[in-house]
Image: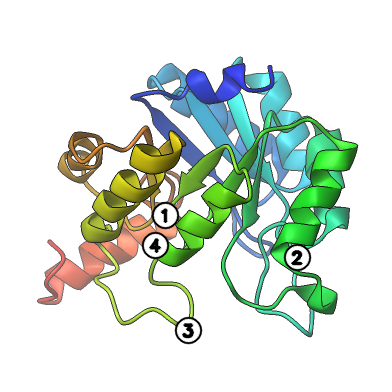
Amino acid sequence: MGHEAIERLRGGLVVSCQALPGELLFGPDLMARMAVAAYEGGAVGIRANSGPDIRAVREAVPLAVIGLIKRTYPDSPVIITPTLREAGEAIEAGAHVLALDATSRPRPGGIPLPRLVEEIRERWKAPLWADVSNLEEGIQAARLGFDVIATTLAGYTDAAGPLDPYAPDFELLKRLVEAVTGRFGIPVVAEGRIWEPAQARRCLELGAFAVVVGSAITRPQRITRRFVEALRGGNHA
C-alpha cells in the first residue's frame, strides 16, 4: 500500500487500538475485534502497537495500519519505536506506515534521530510517521523527510508544560500546519487528548490532514474514569 496508505487517511478518523500488558483488553485477538468495530464505524485507519497486534489487525480489516512497537530501554525515555530493531518488527509484521518517536529526547544507545531515519530508509520503503511534542520537533522531522507529522506527544514530554488531559493542543496543531504543511507540503495529523467529536472536527478545521483518537474510543477504563470524575465534581463532564 505504501504512500497510498497515507492518502487514504485524508479527512478521516484513525482509531488507535492499543492495550498494555496487564489490561483486560490486551492481546491481538481483542485488538483485532476492536479494529473491526472501528472499521464498521467508519474509521479510515488503525494505529496498532506490537507485531502480533499489527498482524492481527492487517488480517481483520482492509484499512491502512500505522504500526509501532513500544519498548522501554533503561537509558532513554523514548518508547515508541525507539530503535532499528522495533522498526523492523513493525514493518515485517505488516505496518503500512511506521510511527516513531521523533522528539528531541535522547534515544537508546545515544543514536541520533537522523541516523535512525537514514538506516530505516536504507532497509525499508514504508512511509514514516513522526510523533512529536512541539513545533521545533515537527520542523526537524519535516527536514528529515518524514511523510507525516503528528501531535501525538504534545504534553507528554519533560519539555511540555501541564495541559488539560481532555483537550488537544489546538495551538500547536495550528502552528504545525502553518510551518510544516505550509512550507514543506507534509500532512499534519492531530493526535492526543481528543475526547469529543467537536474537538476532532475542530482539528480538521485548523488544517489537520486526519485525526487519531484512541482512549476515548478504545480504552473503557479511561472512559469510565472520566465519567466518575464528572460525578465527583470534576471539570470534565
| Residue at point 32%, 44% (across, down) | 177
Please tell me how crowded label 1 is: few (under 14), some (14-19), or many (20+) other residues with Cα within 10 Å. Answer: many
Under tag 1, what secondary structure?
Answer: loop
Which residue is identified by label 1? 151
Left or right, residue 58 beside residue 108: left
Left or right, residue 50 beside residue 178: right
Front residue of 13 and 229:
13
Residue 227 image point, x, y percent: 22, 61
Left or right, residue 203 beside residue 123: left
Residue 65 image point, x, y percent: 62, 30
Please tell me how crowded label 3 is: few (under 14), some (14-19), or many (20+) other residues with Cα within 10 Å. Answer: few
From this view, report whether residue 176 is shown above or below residue 205: below
Residue 82 image point, x, y percent: 74, 63
Which is nearer the N-term, disc 3 or disc 1? 1
Residue 71 is labelled as: 2
Are the residues at dot 2 and dot 1 in contact (C-beta closer than 8 Å)? no
Which residue is identified by label 3? 158
Quadrant of res 212: top left
Distance of label 1 from label 4 (alpha carbons): 9 Å
Front residue of 78 and 183:
183
Q: Quadrant of the C terminus?
A: bottom left
Distance of label 3 from label 1 (alpha carbons): 15 Å
